[in-house]
Image: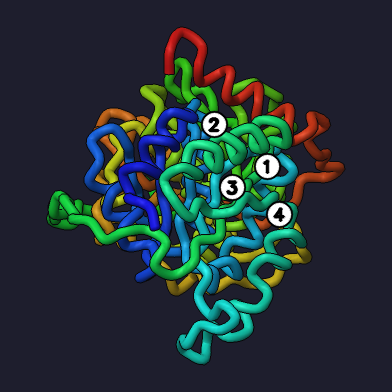
């Protein structure tokens, strides 16, 4: 058994000081220590997949990161690990508990995952390092994990068995509850315009030095078509993760961060909005471009006609929320949002009119991630 402080100190010596995750009873000592330690940052996520995306955003902003989760949560994390961390070559330390380990009496829902935890990690390309059993092993285990992350640019996992870390106290600041913000309307009844035309109208309004994160599908492709920039991150996978990536980035950068989301992607990870509202980064603008369908896969309808994203954001604690449509309305809403501290959300209705001959980003995801990270670091982040 080790002490949580020993693990955290060794992690910090390897530069790992940003933690995010979802609780597990096996994780309690380490998670409580990360929350309580003044030298680390911990962000509680609503899902394991969200945590992976938050950590990816923090890495893009220059931090070294760790994700903590129960092994049952690996199912939620498989998509971003394989379609975000892998193509973009974004490393993170995965601290995964071993519920349902062979020979351990546990709840029935952990039986199968207990048998397949290590093979599943191997299958999704996460290298494994043995969890340290005693104080003498802590430094070498964390050093080996950090070296593998540097060499591979990919997640490395430590599988934590029951009772591996001694219990410790929790020093956590209570969440400050805020009253819902008022939702503004900016020509919301106007005719919806094509998303690419809306983007073209909004881009000149970007603050100097802003970073732009575009969700997967046509949104990123249209942003690339309008002009490839080092400030742009095109999410080619991890649907629903763009806003969580934006959160992780905004929390660790002084630059303005703008997330270009879609209605289908936002619906997939609505929990992200609750985390954004709670963490309240003042430099984050979340724009949901809502065409009511999954346009890049054939136009299948989403349920967005029944969802008021601006009202959801206001209820989650965003400091500014607005509905808009048309080019003038979208621009006016964006300008009004940027005049207020974030987080901010714009729900912009766009049409389903296609863009003929739409291309795809020609820059490899790994290169997109590294130039984005370098861009955020220019003149200090």
How far is disc 2 from disc 1 in space, using C-alphas?
Answer: 13 Å
Classify mark 2: residues with Cα within 10 Å, few (<14), some (14-19) or many (20+): many
Does residue 334 appear in the picture of this structure?
Answer: no
Q: In which quarter of the image is residue 152?
A: top right
- The answer to which of marks 1 and 3 sits earlier in the sequence is 1
The residue at the point 51 percent across, 91 percent down is: 108
Q: In which quarter of the image is the C terminus?
A: top left
Q: Nearer the viewer, mark 1 or mark 3?
A: 1
Residue wearing tag 1: 154
Q: Tag 2, which secondary structure?
A: helix
Mark closer to the observer (2, 3): 2
Nearer-N-terminus badge (2/1): 2
Task: Determine whether 143 is above or below 194 in the image.
Answer: above
Residue mark closest to the camera, 4 vs 1: 1
Q: Earlier in the sequence, mark 2 or mark 3?
A: 2
Q: How far apart are marks 1 and 3 (CA)?
A: 40 Å
Q: Quadrant of the N terminus?
A: bottom left
Element marked by disc 1:
loop
Residue 75, quarter of the rendered image: bottom right
- According to the picture, the residue beneath numbered tag 2 turns out to be 60
- Near-viewer residue (109 or 177): 109
Which residue is the extreme one toward the bottom?
108
Q: Distance between the residues labelled 2 and 3?
A: 32 Å
The residue wearing badge 3 is 193
**What is the spatial separation of the Cα atoms under label 2 and label 4, in whole angstroms?**
17 Å
Seen in the picture, residue 189 relative to 87 is either above or below; the reply is below
x and y percentages locating residue 126 in the rendered image = 69, 52
- Real-space CA distance between mark 4 and mark 1, rounded to the nearest whole angstrom: 10 Å
Q: Mark 4 points at which residue?
A: 82
């Amino acid at each position: 058994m080790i002490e949580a402080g020993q693990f955290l100190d060794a992690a910090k010596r390897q530069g790992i000081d940003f933690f995010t995750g979802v609780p597990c009873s096996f994780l309690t000592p380490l998670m409580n220590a990360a929350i309580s330690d003044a030298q680390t940052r911990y962000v509680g996520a609503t899902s394991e997949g969200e945590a992976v995306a938050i950590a990816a955003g923090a890495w893009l902003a220059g931090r070294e990161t760790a994700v903590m989760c129960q092994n049952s949560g690996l199912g939620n994390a498989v998509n971003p690990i394989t379609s975000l961390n892998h193509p973009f070559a974004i490393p993170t330390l995965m601290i995964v508990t071993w519920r349902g380990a062979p020979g351990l009496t546990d709840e029935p829902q952990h039986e199968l995952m207990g048998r397949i935890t290590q093979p599943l990690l191997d299958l999704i390309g996460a290298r494994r390092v043995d969890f340290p059993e005693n104080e003498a092993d802590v430094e070498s285990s964390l050093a080996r994990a950090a070296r593998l992350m540097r060499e591979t640019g990919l997640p490395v996992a430590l599988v934590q068995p029951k009772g591996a870390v001694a219990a410790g106290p929790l020093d956590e600041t209570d969440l400050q509850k805020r009253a819902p913000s008022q939702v503004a309307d900016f020509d919301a009844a106007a005719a919806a315009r094509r998303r690419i035309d809306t983007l073209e109208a909004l881009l000149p309004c970007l603050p100097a030095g802003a970073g732009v994160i575009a969700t997967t599908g046509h949104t990123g492709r249209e942003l690339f078509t309008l002009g490839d920039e080092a400030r742009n991150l095109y999410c080619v996978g991890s649907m629903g993760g763009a806003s969580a990536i934006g959160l992780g980035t905004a929390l660790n950068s002084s630059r303005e961060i703008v997330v270009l989301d879609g209605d289908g992607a936002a619906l997939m990870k609505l929990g992200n909005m609750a985390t954004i509202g709670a963490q309240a980064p003042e430099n984050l603008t979340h724009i949901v471009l809502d065409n009511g369908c999954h346009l890049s896969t054939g136009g299948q309808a989403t349920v967005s006609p029944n969802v008021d994203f601006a009202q959801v954001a206001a209820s989650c604690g965003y400091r500014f929320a607005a509905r808009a449509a048309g080019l003038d309305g979208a621009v006016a809403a964006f300008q009004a949002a940027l005049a207020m501290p974030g987080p901010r959300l714009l729900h912009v209705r766009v049409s389903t009119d296609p863009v003929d001959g739409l291309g795809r980003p020609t820059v490899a995801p790994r290169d997109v991630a590294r130039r984005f990270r370098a861009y955020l670091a220019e003149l200090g982040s």
